[in-house]
Image (cartoon, rainbow, N blue to C red):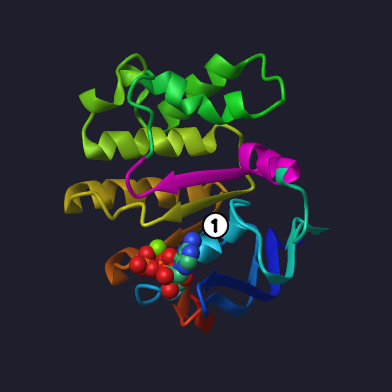
């Protein structure tokens, strides 16, 4: 069963008298274990697609199935549940909360979730171990380098054992050495079976993935598996 299936998905924004077609008839299936890069010019709809996949936004029309369930028109509460429990997010600028320790940042998705997790601290520590950051559990984000912050944000994405990790330009704010390290970590996670979709502007970053989805003007122009 596909993790995501999209059929003729549109997302339009009304700006005064103008209508922006951010997504203009997207059809896409994300299969378990996929490691995909979404490429395309600025304004082509990449982030909009990630927001729709991440239950942060709803499509204007079209259909979306998540693990076989139709989710195109679910309530905001239900969207929040999927966001907190089934999806891992990684952002370009990490989006860590500066006043919280590393381990508490990793626990944030759990605090948004209504699900009880009795072993949550152990889970957070093992996620931090997974990304090589357990030794910094009690630091705060501004005591870490950019590459280390992104590792912590990846640990946060892993805490709920998500069906899919969505990353919008996850290497965009890193220097080339840290890009290599973070990509190596992504590849390890994929080898362990994690489904992973990331937006990137960087062809070299995309070359590490196994599938390239090219967008233009809100549509998928090309979808190549390797
Ligand atoms: N909240 C919004 N309101 C109005 N228009 C929007 C909104 N969000 C996105 N758009 C428009 O939708 C189109 C697609 O935007 P999107 O952010 O998805 O592009 P992108 O491919 O991620 O670009 P970039 O590479 O610059 O991040 C753009 O024309 C953008 O201006
Ligand atoms: Mg974008």
Q: Nearer the viewer, residue 82 or 120?
A: 82
Asked if disc 1 is less than 8 Å from ligand 1, the answer is: yes
Say whether residue 42 is left or right of residue 113: left
Residue 86 included in the magenta stretch of the image: yes
Is 144 placed above or below 52 here? above
Which of the 4 image quadrants contains residue 143? top left
Q: Residue at x 50, y 45 (%)?
A: 89
Which of the 4 image quadrants contains residue 80? top right
Q: Nearer the viewer, residue 88 or 46?
A: 46
Q: Nearer the viewer, residue 16 or 63?
A: 16
Q: Count the numbered circles shown.
A: 1
Q: Which residues are magenta?
A: 77-94
Q: Residue at x 70, y 67 (%)?
A: 5
Name the spot of residue 123 as percent of width and height, x first.
Answer: 56, 22
Residue 82 included in the magenta stretch of the image: yes
Q: Nearer the viewer, residue 119 or 143?
A: 143
Residue 209 visible in the picture: no
Name the spot of residue 159 as percent of width and height, x first.
Answer: 55, 31
Q: Residue at x 42, y 49 (%)?
A: 186
Q: Residue at x 42, y 26 (%)?
A: 129
Is disc 1 placed on a helix, strand or loop? helix
Is 149 placed above or below 64 here? above
Query: Which quadrant of the rendered structure holds the N terminus?
Result: bottom right
Name the spot of residue 152 as percent of width and height, x first.
Answer: 38, 32
Residue 181 visible in the picture: yes
Q: Ligand 2 is in which quadrant of the figure?
A: bottom left
Q: Which residue is mark 1?
A: 51
Q: Residues within 10 Å of mark 1 (few under 14, many from 20)?
A: some
């Amino acid at each position: 069963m596909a993790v995501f299936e999209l059929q003729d998905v549109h997302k339009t924004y009304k700006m005064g008298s103008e209508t922006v077609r951010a997504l203009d008839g997207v059809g896409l299936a994300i299969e378990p274990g996929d490691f995909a890069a979404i490429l395309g010019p600025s304004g082509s709809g990449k982030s909009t697609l990630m927001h729709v996949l991440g239950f942060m936004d709803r499509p204007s029309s079209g259909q979306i199935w998540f693990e076989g369930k139709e989710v195109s028109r679910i309530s905001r509460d239900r969207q929040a549940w999927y966001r907190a429990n089934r999806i891992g997010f990684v952002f370009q600028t990490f989006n860590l909360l500066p006043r919280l320790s590393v381990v508490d940042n990793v626990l944030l998705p759990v605090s948004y979730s209504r699900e009880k997790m009795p072993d949550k601290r152990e889970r957070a520590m093992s996620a931090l171990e997974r990304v090589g950051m357990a030794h910094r559990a009690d630091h705060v984000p501004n005591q870490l380098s950019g590459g280390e912050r992104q590792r912590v944000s990846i640990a946060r994405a892993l805490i709920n054992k998500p069906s899919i990790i969505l990353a919008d330009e996850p290497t965009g704010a890193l220097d080339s050495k840290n890009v290599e390290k973070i990509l190596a970590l992504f590849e390890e996670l994929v080898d362990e079976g994690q489904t992973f979709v990331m937006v990137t502007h960087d062809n070299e970053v995309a070359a590490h993935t196994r599938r390239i989805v090219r967008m233009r003007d809100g549509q998928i122009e090309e979808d190549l598996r390797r």
